[in-house]
Image: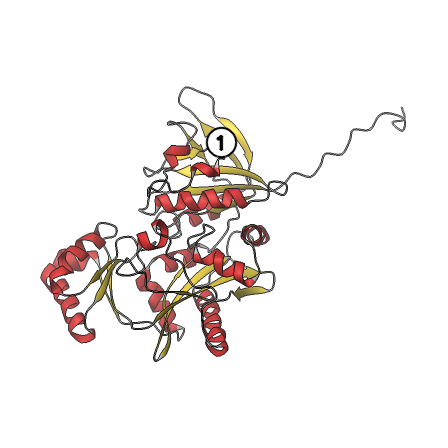
């Protein structure tokens, strides 16, 4: 029988790529991650992508959340929580571990698990350990799901400030003086570990900055002006990470530069300068996120200084084998630029420095989000 005159079923329109925005997490930067997620959810082009917001609670439960970015903002100087936007207080979302299956499932106690459909790419906007440090990236590699940002190694290097500095030094990038105290050193001989810090201060002078070695958003950092404040500073850093980093204060201007992966490779943004905050001892968590101390974009540098910091930012991106994006932080001293650190998932709200630098370079916030998703979709998982 001929099918020539039978009614033809209309062609199904191609399915839009599905983006899972994963946020929150178990680190002390949980709240800032939720704020970042709200900004990303608001910016994603819904005519181009389907979106699935997934929050990770402070306890580690993966929860399906409301797609309501306005509820993910800082209110009354308080950062939001995943629990504030979770659709249920029980059950959880499960990613597949079979690379041949990208279907996400949500389960509730006493209910049959429900499939939420396939995910084409994950946009992880987690900051700190258990998200930005290679752990989530490893899970996504096992699952065969593409994701935005750095891979396992680069994420781990970008999170651990000790090994970050070691990598930079090996590639010829200049870093400032520092000393690291590992947990076993502290447990074996606390007095000797403390003496190493005091001796370091004797060599490089006060003040010192005492930091958790594997944290960000300026959480757990203390500026220490003399030996009297050292004990409390160490205790505060160890509250966030048993491994601590102590840095000498560098005299210079704070300069930041963004790096973004384009089709032809990484490019640097115009740089920004972080002026000394008026009401804070340094550019700490409250200055960054609560009081929103403004940066100067673009930074008032000479053309030669701008070109140099842009080159160094891309060099740092390449040295750590980064992908997607990086914010590189420098001090401009009398001896030139000294790199302080990189962030493989920097603060990403519209008022954060990374988006501001790209806005000034000609890339809007929605375009920035789109470029990151497209870069992730172009990349395979696995060794590359």
Residue 229 lies, in percent from the top left, at: 14, 60
Tell me what residue is drawn at x 49 percent, y 63 percent.
259
Is residue 236 something that shows in the picture?
Answer: yes
Residue 186 falls left or right of residue 165: left
Residue 217 lies, in percent from the top left, at: 34, 54
Quarter of the picture containing the N terminus is top right
* Image label count: 1
Disc 1 secondary structure class? strand
Residue 364 lies, in percent from the top left, at: 56, 55
In the picture as drawn, the residue positioned furthest to the front comes out as 278
Q: Report the residue marked by disc 1.
A: 105
Observer-nearest of 259 and 117: 259
- The correct choice, above or below, for 286 with respect to 362 in the image is above
- The correct choice, above or below, for 303 with respect to 239 in the image is below
Tell me what residue is drawn at x 29 percent, y 52 percent.
219
In the picture as drawn, the residue positioned furthest to the left comes out as 191
Residue 356 lies, in percent from the top left, at: 48, 58
Instruction: Choose top left, top right, bottom left or bottom right for residue 65.
Output: top left
- The correct choice, above or below, for 10 with respect to 42 in the image is above
- The correct choice, above or below, for 108 with respect to 67 in the image is above
Observer-nearest of 321 and 290: 290
Residue count near mark 1 (Cα–Cα under 10 Å), binned few <14, some 14–19, many ≥20? some
Residue 109 falls left or right of residue 180: right
Observer-nearest of 358 and 381: 358
Residue 229 falls left or right of residue 58: left
């Amino acid at each position: 029988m001929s099918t020539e005159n039978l009614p033809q079923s209309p062609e199904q329109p191609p399915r839009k790529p599905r983006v899972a925005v994963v946020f929150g997490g178990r680190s002390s930067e949980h709240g800032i991650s939720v704020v970042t997620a709200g900004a990303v959810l608001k910016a994603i082009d819904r005519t181009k992508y389907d979106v699935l917001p997934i929050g990770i609670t402070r306890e580690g439960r993966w929860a399906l959340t409301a797609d309501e970015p306005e509820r993910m903002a800082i209110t009354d100087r308080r950062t939001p929580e995943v629990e504030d936007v979770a659709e249920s207080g029980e059950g959880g979302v499960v990613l597949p571990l079979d690379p041949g299956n990208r279907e996400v499932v949500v389960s509730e106690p006493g209910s049959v698990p429900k499939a939420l459909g396939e995910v084409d790419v994950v946009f992880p906007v987690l900051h700190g350990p258990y998200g930005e440090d290679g752990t989530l990236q490893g899970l996504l590699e096992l699952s065969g799901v593409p994701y935005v940002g750095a891979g396992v190694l680069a994420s781990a290097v970008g999170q651990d400030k000790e090994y970050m500095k070691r990598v930079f030094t090996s590639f010829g990038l200049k870093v400032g003086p520092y000393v690291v105290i590992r947990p076993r050193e502290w447990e074996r001989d606390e007095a000797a570990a403390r003496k190493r810090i005091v001796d370091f201060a004797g060599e490089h002078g006060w003040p010192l900055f005492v930091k958790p070695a594997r944290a960000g958003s300026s959480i757990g950092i203390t500026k220490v002006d003399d030996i009297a404040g050292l004990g409390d500073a160490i205790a505060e850093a160890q509250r966030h990470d048993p491994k601590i980093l102590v840095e000498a204060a560098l005299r210079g201007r704070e300069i930041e530069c963004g790096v973004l992966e384009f089709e032809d490779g990484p490019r640097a943004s115009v740089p920004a300068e972080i002026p000394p905050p008026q009401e804070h001892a340094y550019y700490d968590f409250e200055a960054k996120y609560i009081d929103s101390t403004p940066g100067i974009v673009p930074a008032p540098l000479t053309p030669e200084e701008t070109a140099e910091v842009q080159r160094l930012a891309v060099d740092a991106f390449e040295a750590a084998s980064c992908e997607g994006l990086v914010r590189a932080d420098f001090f401009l001293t009398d001896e030139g630029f000294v790199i302080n650190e990189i962030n493989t998932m920097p603060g990403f709200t519209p008022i954060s420095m990374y988006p501001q630098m790209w806005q000034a370079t000609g890339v809007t916030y929605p375009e920035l989000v789109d470029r990151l998703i497209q870069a992730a979709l172009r990349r395979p998982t696995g060794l590359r």
